[in-house]
Amino acid sequence: MRPPLPVSRGDAFELTEFLLAADLSVDGIGEPGVHLWVDLDPDGRIVGSTGFELDGRDALLRGIAVHSSLTESDRRIQLARFALDRATSIGATRAWLLGRRAGALWQDLGFELAHIADLEEALASTHPVRSLAASSQLAYQTAWSRPLP
């Protein structure tokens, strides 16, 4: 499969719908500092997404999802690695994610469980953290972290 494409302004609505269907955060979609890419099918529909948001040298992985029609079970891992590589290439030294599920996937990528308070401190300016903190839902999330090479 080809590398993901950067999200364009025209993709924002469809990406929002795609992420909502995957039960993922759409906070900050289209905002500066939120780096997102998509996989498109031959008809131009989004079938995969990945990205991150930076806060200093810390990167919060965002929007890693694959449409159920894709048969490649490892595409989600490929998309996560793509985002990790891109974050590293622009100077991130630690990757974080918030996830209520897919623990084995994150462990396979070198992530370890982390304290939510550490994530909140490192990523206080990111859209999902601000939104979840404001709604008192951050404490109910699971934090994962790993150093970047």
Image (spheres, helix red, strand yellow):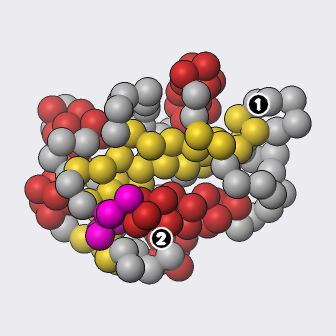
Residue drawn at x 61%, y 19% as measured from the top left:
10
Q: Quadrant of the N terminus?
A: bottom right
Q: Residue at x 44, y 43 (%)?
A: 35
In the drawing, does residue 129 fall left or right of residue 2?
Answer: left
Q: Quadrant of the C terminus?
A: bottom left
Q: Nearer the viewer, residue 143 or 84?
A: 84
User: Where is residue 133 drawn, in percent x and y?
Assistant: 16, 39
- Which range of residues does the magenta coloring cover? 90-99
Is 123 left or right of 5, judged from the image as shown? left
Q: Amino acid at mark 2?
A: Trp
At horizontal 86% and vertical 29% (from top left) the residue drawn is 43
- Whichever of callouts 1 and 2 sits on the residue coming sooner in the sequence is 1
Residue 123 vs 30, above or below: the answer is below
Residue 17 in sight from this viewpoint: no
Q: Quadrant of residue 12?
A: top right
User: Which residue is tagged 2?
Assistant: 106
Q: CA distance from mark 1 to mark 2?
A: 26 Å
* Image coords of residue 116 (percent x, y): 19, 60
Return the residue nearer the eye: 41 or 65.
Answer: 41
In the rendered image, which residue does mark 1 sit on? 45
Compared to 81, does 18 lie above or below? above
What amino acid type is highlighted by mark number 1? Arg
Q: Secondary structure at mark 1?
A: loop
